Amino acid sequence: MAISKVELFNENEILLADLAKALSHPARIKILQILTDMNVCMCGDIVELLPLSQSTVSQHLKELKRVGLVQGEIEGQKVCYCVNNKMIEKAKEAFAKLLSHVCKC
Amino acid sequence: MAISKVELFNENEILLADLAKALSHPARIKILQILTDMNVCMCGDIVELLPLSQSTVSQHLKELKRVGLVQGEIEGQKVCYCVNNKMIEKAKEAFAKLLSHVCKC
DNA sequence: ATCGTTTATCGTAAATATACGATTAAATAA
DNA sequence: TTATTTAATCGTATATTTACGATAAACGAT
């Protein structure tokens, strides 16, 4: 694209779009589910559960961290990742609000 | 990317990621709100409410149509767009399900 | 001090997304 | 018929995303 016009929209729309972007790849959705369901928090463990390389999984984790859906705590040489309940809740409310508003059911 | 690995994930994850992708640009969120709030359905009317060109808005509408969040009905030379309540509802449930599952609040 | 483990980052290639103006296609109006 | 209106598509430029292997950085173990 020539230039990004994202900054011409308002806070709320940008936040929601940003959260949606973070959820816009199946690997990242899977990662959230893995962090919830399996008793797993390390990048290496996630790599073993996905058909992707370590560097690619690390990139996906970075994207999830970027918007705050996931946090990483350093534990020696490892990093323990977990979902950030506050931001998950915030995302849940934001999507529900938009989609309820938009749907006249 | 060398190759897409999206097909290595399951239906549910792909659907959700696809819906998220459609919502991952502020302009498309705004378009959903415009179709709901303003008494407007034509592409041209939407263009006037956004800082984007007609061709760009048409592309965004195409993306929303692709996942079924929006429908377009041809009315002579115009096309009347509207949100597809069924898919909006489906999206609402899908996001709520994922984010409720993932959040242990 | 060296070696293994773990994760992040770099470099790179290819796909996709975003934006625009120009053009096309289809319907209506003159 | 010709002109106008409306939306889609084409062509193009640039940015971003996705993916990988290689490397670096940081820590723990030997």
Image (tube, coloured by chain):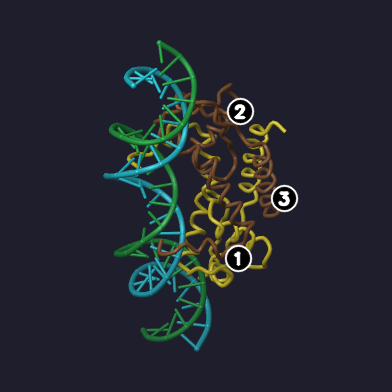
Chain colours: A brown, B yellow, C cyan, D green
User: Crowding at label 2, few (<14), some or many (≥20) Cα neighbours within 10 Å?
Assistant: some
Q: Residue A13, labelled with which disc?
A: none
Q: Residue B38, percent across and down? A: 67, 67
Amino acid marked by disc 3: Cys
Q: Residue A14: which quarter of the image?
A: bottom right
B78 above or below B18?
below
CA gap, disc 3 to disc 2?
32 Å
Asked whether A31 or B30 is in front, the reply is: A31
**Is residue C2 left or right of B72 when viewed as pictured?**
left
Q: Which residue is mark 3?
A: A105
Is residue B47 shown above or below A6?
below
Q: Secondary structure at mark 2?
A: helix
Q: CA distance from mark 2 to mark 1?
A: 41 Å
- For the N terminus of chain A, the quadrant is bottom left
Name the chain under label 3.
A
Task: Answer with the quarter of the image where residue C14 lies.
Answer: top left
* C30 relative to B26, above or below: below
Provide the residue designation for mark 1.
B41
Determine the residue positioned at 57% across, 68% down: B46
The image position of residue B54, as x and y in percent, is 48, 69
User: Is B92 left, or right, of B70 in this rendering?
Assistant: right
> Which residue: 63% across, 37% down?
A84
- Mark 3–mark 2 contact, CB under 8 Å? no
Residue A36: give its label.
Answer: 2
Contact (CB < 8 A) between labels 2 and 1?
A: no
Left or right position of C4 against C18: left
Helix or strand or loop: what does disc 3 sit on? loop
